[in-house]
Image: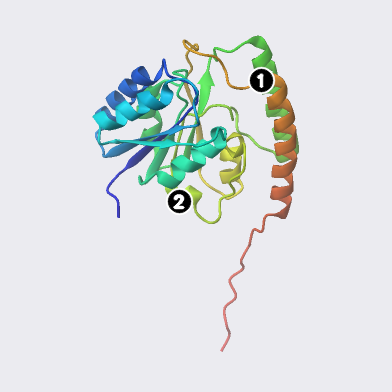
Amino acid sequence: MSDIVYSVVVPVFNEEESLVELHRELVQVMDEIGEVYEIIYIDDRSTDGSGSVLDSLQKESSTVEVVHFAHHKGQSAAFYAGFQKARGRWIITLDADLQNDAADIAKIVRYRDEFDLIQGIRKKRKDSLLRHISSQIAFLSRKIVLRDNTIDTGCSLRCFHRRCLENNFFFFYNFHRFFAYLLQIRDCRILQIEVNHRPRRFGKSKYTLWRRLWEGLFDLGGVYWLKRRLIKLDVVRNERKN
């Protein structure tokens, strides 16, 4: 059995300018935590120099693993590939654009023995007003349709036990937007805590508002169907009488 405690999974798509600083921040916080770890970067068929930067990081450190996609598949596929590769008992995820603050990892792992998933909530989000409004609409839609109480599904900074992926966890495109909810309906212990959110310094967002809207509506319907069809057993103990 692997002695790795933490697997840090980072999807990457055209983030060449941020990767060296991101890696420095990750190494610093993980070294301070002081337990065995690995960092897994998933190159989602970047068209800039991200792949070369990641290969250099892998050559320089035995703690780094890199997976290169042959075709662009999106963030959910990148997370899925990272989860399959991960060997740690706990899996940590975050974005590669430096908006997630790697220093917050030390904050969320403090709760690992009390909860199955620690989910970040971006405090004072550095996004446009339009994105704030669209996020609030999405939150209300999920709350009404699914009774989902996840405050910030768009925050990729989270830590969860690998057992959360067991028992036929449902992987589909955009599953990461419903990750906390999919664990919630399996009665996992979930904590949501505020984390830092920094302005984007390099590149641009990979999502358009209309794409997120239509994909979100489609996925919401699919997850609602899944919720209605999910088998949950309430077993009553039946003792045999002699």
Quarter in which the C terminus is drawn: bottom right
Could you say whether the residue bearing mark 1 is in a helix, strand or loop? Answer: loop
Indicate which disc residue 163 carries.
2
Give residue 187's position: percent from left, percent from top. Answer: 56, 49
Q: How many marks?
A: 2
- Answer whether residue 115 is visible to the viewer in this image: no
Bin the neighbour count of mark 2 within 10 Å (Cα to Cα): few under 14, some 14-19, many 20 and up: few
Say which mark, if any, is on residue 208: 1
State the image coordinates of residue 73 (x, y, percent, origin top left).
57, 35
- Identity, as a three-letter code, of the amino acid under mark 2: Arg
Vertical side of 231 occupied by 74: above or below: above
Q: Residue at x 31, y 43 (%)?
A: 5
Q: Dot 1 surroundings within 10 Å: few (below 14), some, or many (20 or more)?
A: few
In the rendered structure, the answer to whether residue 234 lies left or right of residue 120 reads right
Q: Quadrant of residue 77?
A: top right
**Quadrant of the frame with the N terminus:** bottom left
Q: Is residue 112 above or below residue 163?
A: above
**Front disc: 1 or 2:** 1
Residue 89: x and y, percent?
36, 46
Local secondary structure at mark 2: helix
Of residue 229 and residue 200, the one placed in the foreground of this image is 200
Left or right: where 168 falls relative to 140:
left
Residue appearing at x 47%, y 10% in the figure: 201
Asked if labels 2 and 1 touch by Cβ distance under 8 angstroms, the answer is no
Comparing 16 with 166, the one in front is 16
Residue at screen point 72% across, 28% down = 140
Residue 168 sits in which quadrant?
Answer: bottom right
* Quarter residue 148 falls in: top right
Looking at numbered disc 1 in the image, what kind of residue is underneath it? Thr
Looking at the image, what colour scheme do you see? rainbow
